[in-house]
């Protein structure tokens, strides 16, 4: 069953003064679906629009156009407070920096108790039992964390507490925006494994936002590769990352360093175009970097083509 559907989602930011305003198309007609008990990844370099998509889903930003459907209901730009609280209860966020999630002057336990109280997820006499269950799911004990301040935890521990806090409301979907980028490399896999365990044990779906293709490959069921606001390739993670079809996905895969001196990079990085020029192009936004560019790529936007069980936005396959 479709848990979340994103339809033609667009977000345009307008910048500058009244007399010289410019527009930035941060998200450009994005479409994807997340099934129940599925980990779906949005991947791409900084500025690709993936975080903007997540913020619109969470109702932190208003969409310029398009729709977001949750369990078949349109939740784009929710205004009603009760409806918004119901949605927030079922769709919880996990942010990039766990140290920014918590006030350093407040005990972590206060946040956990408040989350349970604000969403009325249990009777007062059952709240502590619920918190223990949530913390147990991430490998922590309530007695060990409730009286401590954020500074008394490592980044990995605090991110686990962020996940536990999200689990208190028993959500159906977690929106995790770069959840391991601020965590030591030695702890990243423990957080990623946690998402897999939550999916398998609690049937929680995850929208995983990342630029790290290694963790994306390990944890994801499906993946969408974003570039300059567009999804350029989307499908089963095994197909997309092992047999990429879009030139940008190929480039991303090749950019992952391998511990083999025979495979060291020999090409020079050539940044021919500024971001502004790439955004203002009429055709394919990747044409300035693409080794397979054709004349049509510079003048016409490529269509979304269904190919081998995936969607590819490229003229190479038309």
Image: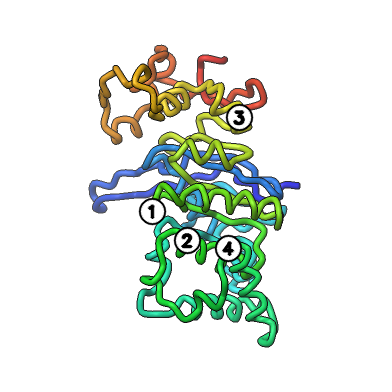
Q: Position of residue 260 (x, y in %)?
A: 38, 23
Question: Against 85, is 282 above or below?
Answer: above
Which mark, by number, is residue 139? 4
* Contact between labelled residues 1 and 2, with CB atoms less than 8 Å apart: yes
- Comparing 198 with 3, the one in front is 198
Residue 60 image position (x, y, % from top left): 47, 61
The residue located at (64%, 47%) in the rendering is 5
* Residue 140 visible here: yes
Question: Which structural element holds mark 4?
Answer: loop
For the point 72% across and 47% down, the residue is: 2
Q: CA distance from mark 4 to mark 3?
A: 29 Å
Q: Earlier in the sequence, mark 2 or mark 1?
A: 2
Residue of label 2: 159
Locate residue 287: give its quadrant.
Answer: top left
Tag on residue 238?
3
- Marks 2 and 1 sit apart, C-alpha to C-alpha, by 9 Å
Pointer 1 or 4: first along the chain:
4
**Mark 4 and mark 1 in contact (Cβ < 8 Å)?**
no
Q: How many marks?
A: 4
Pointer 1: what residue?
A: 182
Q: Residues within 10 Å of mark 4 (few under 14, many from 20)?
A: few
């Amino acid at each position: 069953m479709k848990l979340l559907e994103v339809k033609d989602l667009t977000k345009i930011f307008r910048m500058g003064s009244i007399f010289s305003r410019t527009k930035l198309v941060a998200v450009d007609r994005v479409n994807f679906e997340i099934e129940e008990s599925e980990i779906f990844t949005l991947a791409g370099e900084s500025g690709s629009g993936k975080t903007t998509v997540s913020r619109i889903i969470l109702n932190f930003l208003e969409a310029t156009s398009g729709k977001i459907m949750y369990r078949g209901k349109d939740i784009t730009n929710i205004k009603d407070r009760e409806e918004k609280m119901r949605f927030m209860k079922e769709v919880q966020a996990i942010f990039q920096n766990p140290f920014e999630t918590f006030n350093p002057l407040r005990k972590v336990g206060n946040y956990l108790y408040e989350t349970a109280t604000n969403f009325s997820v249990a009777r007062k006499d059952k709240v502590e039992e619920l918190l223990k269950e949530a913390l147990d799911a991430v490998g922590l004990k309530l007695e060990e964390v409730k009286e401590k301040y954020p500074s008394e935890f490592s980044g990995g521990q605090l991110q686990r507490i962020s996940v536990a806090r999200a689990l208190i409301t028993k959500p159906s979907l977690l929106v995790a925006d770069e959840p391991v980028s601020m965590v030591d490399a030695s702890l990243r896999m423990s957080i990623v494994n946690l998402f897999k365990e939550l999916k398998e044990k609690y049937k929680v779906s995850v929208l995983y936002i990342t630029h790290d293709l290694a963790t994306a490959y390990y944890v994801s069921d499906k993946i969408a590769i974003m570039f300059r606001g567009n999804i350029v390739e989307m499908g089963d993670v095994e197909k997309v990352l092992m047999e990429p079809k879009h030139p940008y996905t190929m480039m991303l895969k090749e950019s992952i360093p391998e511990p083999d001196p025979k495979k060291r990079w020999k090409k020079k990085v050539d940044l021919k175009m500024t971001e502004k020029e790439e955004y203002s192009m009429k055709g394919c936004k990747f044409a300035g970097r693409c080794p397979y560019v054709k004349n049509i790529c510079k003048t016409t936007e490529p269509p979304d083509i269904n190919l081998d069980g995936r969607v590819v936005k490229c003229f190479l396959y038309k």
